């Protein structure tokens, strides 16, 4: 009984060693991309600030009744970024809003990539009429403007953060589906797939043990690129008044600034901070995504640096 157990432990140790080696090789290659390191560093700082928001500014920063300043104060020592129309600190709102914007971006991108990966693998594996029907549905979603579909869903459903996540996730998966399907077709044309099928491997075994691990690098790169799009879409929906009115997000801050007449009144400190924050986070995720894509696809290595 000890021999099989020892053999199983050895196989598990070897598998973990290979995974650690793969991660180490990935990090060594990623470190050569200075833009990717800059994006990763910026995201790490923003994420830490967002996680520490309750300690840095406190949850009462969102309160309208207990606002510490006067309405629309310009930047000063007490309020480095000024105040909004209710007298709340814009710096505190900016820090607190990072929690919602990052959460929506991460979860919406994860949902989108999960749907796209599932559809792409199923279409590529089964082929035939199933693939034809699936791809025609995918093409329909692809030609329809994602923002318009998201607005429709956000309008007919209740206004909440989960509605925004669902609206973004279920409308932005077609690109991932087409990429994963193409990669699945390439993987299933390899000889070891035929050997696995001949040895009795079923559909679930082939897709989970052979296809999915080979498309995961593509899925990872697509996820990092999709997060920035999800954050921009969330900001757009919030700016249009379709976000959750009970939470603070960067897009919601822009919507409040528009309603307060910051554009016509010249209150630039109300508009600039959330707009710059959205641009910085979107750029950082894009830089990370390009670096990951370059590492996983060496053919892009020279041009992506």
Image (cartoon, rainbow, N blue to C red):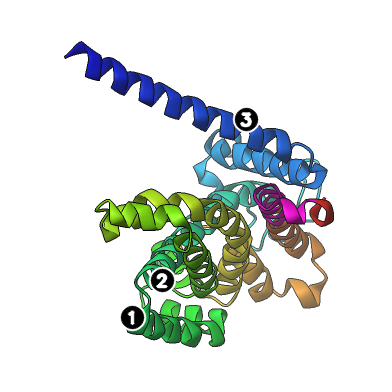
Q: Residues within 10 Å of mark 2 (few under 14, many from 20)?
A: some
Residue sitting nearer the eye, 183 or 31: 183
Residue at far left of view:
1
* Residue 130: mark: 1
Q: Does residue 63 appear in this view?
A: no
Answer with left or right where residue 3 lies relative to residue 190: left
- Residue 196 place in picture, x, y as percent: 34, 52
- Residue 212 place in picture, x, y as percent: 43, 54
- Residue 274 place in picture, x, y as percent: 70, 59
**Residue tagged 2:** 159
Residue sitting nearer the eye, 257 or 286: 286
User: Which element type, helix, strand or loop, lies under badge 1?
Assistant: helix
Q: Quadrant of residue 11?
A: top left
* Nearer mark to the viewer, of 1 and 3: 1
User: Which element type, helix, strand or loop, lies under badge 2?
Assistant: loop
Residue sitting nearer the eye, 165 or 156: 165
**Residue tagged 3:** 24
Q: Are marks 1 and 3 in contact (CB under 8 Å)?
A: no
- Residue 216 place in picture, x, y as percent: 50, 52
The residue located at (42%, 84%) in the rendering is 137
């Amino acid at each position: 009984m000890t021999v099989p157990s020892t053999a199983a432990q050895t196989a598990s140790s070897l598998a973990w060693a290979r995974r650690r080696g793969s991660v180490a090789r990935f990090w060594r290659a990623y470190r050569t991309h200075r833009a990717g390191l800059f994006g990763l560093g910026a995201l790490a700082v923003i994420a830490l600030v967002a996680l520490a928001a309750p300690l840095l500014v406190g949850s009462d920063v969102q309160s309208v009744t207990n606002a510490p300043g006067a309405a629309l104060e310009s930047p000063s020592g007490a309020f480095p970024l000024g105040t909004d129309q209710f007298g709340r600190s814009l710096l505190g709102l900016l820090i607190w809003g990072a929690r919602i914007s990052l959460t929506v971006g991460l979860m919406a991108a994860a949902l989108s990539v999960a749907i796209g990966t599932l559809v792409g693998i199923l279409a590529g594996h089964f082929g035939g009429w199933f693939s034809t029907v699936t791809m025609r549905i995918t093409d329909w979603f692809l030609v329809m403007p994602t923002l318009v579909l998201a607005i429709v869903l956000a309008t007919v459903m209740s206004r909440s953060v989960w509605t925004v996540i669902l609206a973004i996730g279920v409308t932005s998966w077609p690109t991932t589906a087409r990429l994963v399907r193409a990669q699945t077709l390439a993987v299933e044309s390899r000889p070891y797939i035929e050997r696995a099928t001949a040895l009795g491997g079923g559909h679930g075994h082939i897709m989970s043990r052979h296809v999915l691990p080979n498309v995961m690098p593509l899925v990872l790169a697509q996820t990092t690129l999709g997060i920035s799009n999800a954050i921009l879409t969330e900001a757009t929906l919030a700016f249009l008044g379709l976000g959750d009115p009970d939470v603070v997000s960067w897009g919601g801050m822009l919507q409040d600034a528009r309603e307060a007449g910051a554009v016509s009144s010249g209150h630039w400190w109300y508009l600039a901070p959330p707009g710059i924050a959205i641009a910085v986070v979107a750029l950082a995720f894009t830089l990370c995504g390009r670096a990951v894509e370059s590492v996983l696809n060496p053919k892009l290595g020279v041009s992506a640096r």
